[in-house]
Image: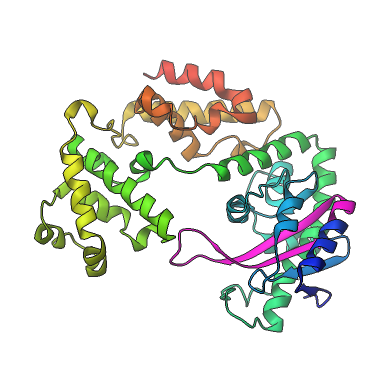
Amino acid sequence: MTKNFRMINATEELVAFCDLAQANGWLALDTEFVRTRTLYAELGLVQARTGAEIVLIDPLNGVDLSALWQLLRSDVITVLHAAGEDLEIFQRNNAAPKYLFDTQIANAFITDGSQIGYAGLVEQMLDVSLDKSQSRTDWLQRPLSPAQLEYAAADVEYLAELYPTLRAKTVASGMEPLVLAECQEQVAKRARETVAELAWRDIGGVNLLDGTGRAILRELAQWRLELAREKNIALPFVARDHILTDIARKKPSNRHELSQIEELHPKSLRLYGEAILQCVERGAAVPESEHPEEIPRYDQDSQYKRFFKAAKALLKEAGEAANIPVPLMGSRKQINEVYVWQHFTRESTKAKLYSPDLYNGWRGELVATSMAELVAANR
């Protein structure tokens, strides 16, 4: 573990560090955050390295992070590993990296396409075993111990050492354009917010509901998401998915009937009972012609099975032809997105959604036409 880092406790110190990173053209970056009962991650610490300079930035001590957010929007290369949740934090601060290099993505493209964690990659490439004993730290607590700070600093110390090697390998293998394209696709995806009125589509068990039940679930899911965003409450702490589905199926019309919903917490009943019943009432009043489309359980359907098998073969063939690791071509989830998009999504709904990954970006360039033909052949 490194002790060669310094804490940034003043805005002018952060500005100076960002100037150095700007001059170097890159920085390695990581964040520590807490997300337990909140919808949005609460930032507890920012770690950064450029050149030999390693800094820890405490967002809770009054340092203005504007210079860092501005840096990410500039032409500087931002190096992260498995950037997903970090990107959500940056997006909420209007600081989506203009140029992202994700070491997990890069390693996947130059190996067999598998996803490896940061500690595993450091051990594999640098022969360094990282101490994981501080992984359960509450990063919002103060003061942080020396061991916790050293643990955090190591996340960027070795990330900066991985970067030049991985970057050179992506260039040498001809994979650099695809790696950078995939990185930017991840940035773009993290910028997308679920359309509240379509949140019902992501809830398991929707296939068990009739048309009225889907209309009620639509109201419930929209209400829950909007409340969660307004109050910054994690969705399960409003009501879990299966509880919403159960309410939509049983259609309670009064507080007593609602109280009979299994696992609905008494606190949720007290706080949200009236709002939930209003959702049920609104959904029940939706005319049949305006019911949300049916999304049946399709994974046991013979037509779907034929499509999935053919889609997997198509992606394998396209990946091998382009010398791209097959696992990166498309996951089961991404294949399923195409099937649901084509078979169970109305045109009016499509207008409010992003089209499937396999129809967009570098994947779309390789397989979109063939995938559309495959869907047509399996109608």
Q: Is residue 34 magenta-colored? A: yes
Magenta stretch holds residue 247:
no
Comparing 138 with 364, the one in front is: 138
Residue 47's quadrant in the figure?
bottom right
Image coords of residue 242 (percent x, y): 28, 54
Q: Which residues are magenta?
A: 21-49
Frontmost residue, 170 versus 345: 345
Q: Is residue 92 left or right of residue 290?
A: right
Quadrant of the snapshot with the N terminus: bottom right
At 68% from the left edge and 25% from the top edge, which residue is drawn?
Answer: 321
Residue 146 appears in the rendering: yes
Which residue is painted at 47% across and 40% down in the image? 333
| Residue appearing at x 81%, y 37% in the figure | 173
Residue 220 in the image: x percent, y percent? 28, 48
Picture coordinates of residue 342 (x, y %)?
A: 40, 24
Give the left or right position of residue 43, taking residue 277 as reference.
right
